[in-house]
Image (spheres, rainbow, N blue to C red):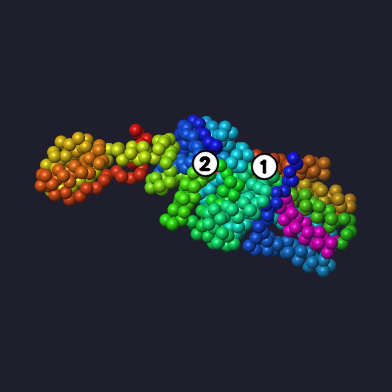
């Protein structure tokens, strides 16, 4: 029997844990700022192309998406593992991969809501439909967001220090090392997203450090690998013993 | 009939051995897992509930391996020691979610039955975060019972309960035992186990110290050599009178403490002997205090015997 990758009850519990008790509002603050900046920029008379790329590619895709990915990707599972309530999901005859795919689906949709939607709106505000730039950046944000969600969810399963390690990756590897070491850019989710965006937009509108032929396989391998590994790790999750 | 079999199981964490070559088999009825804190009770329950892999040996339910086998949860209900349980959900939502996660047909009916079983219907619409310890324990029970499991594993279920809640939970567990379910609960309190379980398994420092009928083990515990510190008006004369009786194994005059250290073999005999001997010799007893009545010393005696 083929099973749906999303289990309704797990999804419901995850959404409530992630967005319940005003946490949803907190998550919406950064995207709202991005949208506000886009609106201000749109009414200015600067170079619209440069403003759009700076706000949506650098700030949005470069900073907002990895941070959202970190908060949401770890938030859908690491919190439950930390406080022990994951026991109630695991002590059930549920395939472990279904728990992972359900939580990942919730994470990806949440990240898209809080990053892809403001990116699309901001892009349209600043640059209209010209060169397909708004749609391209939105797609880039979506693929990067999904990959971040999967990687950070995996991190939340394997490590008790997921947030610290995730921050180190997003800030130190992607931003700092990525700016100086060329090889590091090949292994950067942000650059993979940019490669996808570049391919969608009109020629010469965007630049990316990684070729599309490299970015797409890496995106797929990273995401699928994270799902498989997280499922295996979750199946062997050990409860910490107080005594 | 559901039987959990632990076969030559050891579990170590780095250099620390938490469970050391333990073999036991838990069948229908209520079994108490007794041992002092840190003895490895939780480790054993985690091994039996599939949340810990044995470093050596096997843990099975009716022959099926438990580790990395989610199908066993159709038969097992687990009541974990930790309290966190989706605090934002109401009791009803929590138990219903558990029924749905089991894939039960008619999850609402199952949740209703489980909540009725633990008498928690009156508070089912309140968030579990507002519950007292005893209420949380009962809702955890309901979540573990929602799929009518044949095995129920409870890690220190009486912790933090008031006497009334304790009696209620004991009645419930006793009933499950009579119904033929396999019920295992851990406790470090002798009296709790005594009230509930006929069959007990004792673990001390990761080792399986004793197994079997409670009364037999209780007798072993009572019959062990007891040590007392005795002060009297004439320690030396009292010592001479006591050593003449068969219930006394050894006596030492402790000059620093100005007291006698007495080792008695026969607990019953010694408790009648001491006042009688003192009275006959005209000696006044000033203090009698047991020197090693802690549960740990009782347990360690069981291990060495």
As drawn, the residue found furthest toward the left would be B282
Q: Which residue is located at x 63 percent, y 53 percent?
A: B109
As drawn, B30 above or below B167: above
Task: Please tell me if label 1 and label 2 are on a single chain.
Answer: no
Front-most of B82 and B105?
B105
Callout 1 secondary element: loop
Residue A41 is a magenta residue: no
Front-most of B31 and A190?
B31
Front-most of B56 and A23?
B56
SS majority, magenta: helix
Residue B180's label in the rendered image is 2
Quadrant showing the N terminus of chain A: top right
Number of other residues with Cα within 10 Å of mark 2, as a class: few under 14, some 14 to 19, many 20 or more:
some
Residue, disc 1 = A95
Magenta span covers which residues?
A105-127
Callout 2 secondary element: loop
Q: Which residue is located at x 80 percent, y 62 percent?
A: A122
Horizontal placement of B247 versus B113: left or right?
left
Q: Is residue A60 visible?
A: no
Measured as percent of width and height from the top left, residue B36 is found at 40, 44
Q: Is residue B252 visible?
A: yes
Horizontal placement of A69 versus B305: left or right?
right
The chain carrying label 2 is B
Q: Which residue is located at x 58 percent, y 34 percent?
A: B65
Q: Which residue is located at x 19 percent, y 42 percent?
A: B273
């Amino acid at each position: 029997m083929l099973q749906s990758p999303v289990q309704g009850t797990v999804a419901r519990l995850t959404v409530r844990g992630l967005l319940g008790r005003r946490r949803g509002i907190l998550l919406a603050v950064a995207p709202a700022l991005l949208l506000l900046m886009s609106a201000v920029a749109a009414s200015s008379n600067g170079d619209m192309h440069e403003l759009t790329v700076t706000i949506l590619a650098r700030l949005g895709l470069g900073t907002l998406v990895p941070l959202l990915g970190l908060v949401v990707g770890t938030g859908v599972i690491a919190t439950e593992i930390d406080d022990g309530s994951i026991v109630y999901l695991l002590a059930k005859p549920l395939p472990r991969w279904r728990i992972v795919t359900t939580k990942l689906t919730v994470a990806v949709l949440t990240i898209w809501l809080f990053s892809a939607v403001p990116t699309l709106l901001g892009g349209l505000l600043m640059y209209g439909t010209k060169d397909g730039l708004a749609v391209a950046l939105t797609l880039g944000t979506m693929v990067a967001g999904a990959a971040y969600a999967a990687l950070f969810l995996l991190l939340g399963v394997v490590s008790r220090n997921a947030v610290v390690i995730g921050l180190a990756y997003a800030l130190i590897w992607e931003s700092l090392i990525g700016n100086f070491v060329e090889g590091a850019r090949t292994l950067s989710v942000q650059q993979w997203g940019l490669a996808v965006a570049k391919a969608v937009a009109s020629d010469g509108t965007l630049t990316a450090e990684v070729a599309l032929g490299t970015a797409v396989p890496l995106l797929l391998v990273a995401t699928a690998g994270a799902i498989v590994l997280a499922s295996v790790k979750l199946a062997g999750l050990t409860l910490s013993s107080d005594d | 009939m559901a039987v959990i079999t632990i076969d030559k199981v050891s579990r170590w964490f780095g250099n620390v051995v938490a469970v050391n070559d333990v073999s036991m088999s838990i069948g229908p009825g209520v079994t108490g897992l007794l041992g002092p804190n840190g003895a490895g009770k939780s480790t054993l329950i985690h091994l039996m509930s599939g949340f810990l892999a044995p470093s050596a040996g096997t843990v099975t339910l009716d022959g099926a391996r438990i580790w990395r086998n989610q199908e066993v949860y159709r038969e097992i209900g687990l009541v974990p020691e930790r309290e966190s349980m989706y605090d934002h959900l109401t009791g009803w939502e929590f138990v219903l979610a558990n029924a749905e996660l089991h894939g039960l047909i008619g999850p609402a009916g199952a949740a209703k039955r489980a909540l009725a079983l633990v008498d928690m219907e009156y508070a089912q619409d309140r968030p579990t975060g507002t519950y007292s310890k005893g209420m949380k324990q009962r809702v955890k029970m309901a979540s573990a019972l929602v799929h009518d499991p044949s095995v129920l594993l409870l890690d220190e279920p009486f912790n933090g309960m008031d006497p009334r809640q304790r009696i209620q939970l004991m009645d419930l567990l006793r009933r499950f035992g009579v119904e033929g379910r396999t019920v295992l609960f851990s406790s470090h309190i002798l009296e709790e186990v005594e009230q509930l379980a006929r069959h007990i398994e004792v673990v001390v420092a990761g080792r399986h110290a004793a197994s079997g009928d409670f009364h037999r083990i209780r007798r072993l515990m009572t019959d062990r050599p007891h040590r007392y510190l005795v002060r009297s008006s004439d320690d030396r004369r009292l010592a001479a009178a006591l050593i003449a009786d068969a219930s006394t194994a050894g006596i030492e005059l402790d000059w620093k403490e100005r007291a006698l250290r007495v080792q008695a073999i026969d607990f019953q005999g010694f408790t009648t002997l001491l006042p009688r001997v003192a009275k006959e010799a005209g000696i006044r007893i000033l203090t009698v205090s047991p020197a090693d009545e802690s549960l740990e010393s009782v347990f360690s005696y069981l291990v060495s015997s």
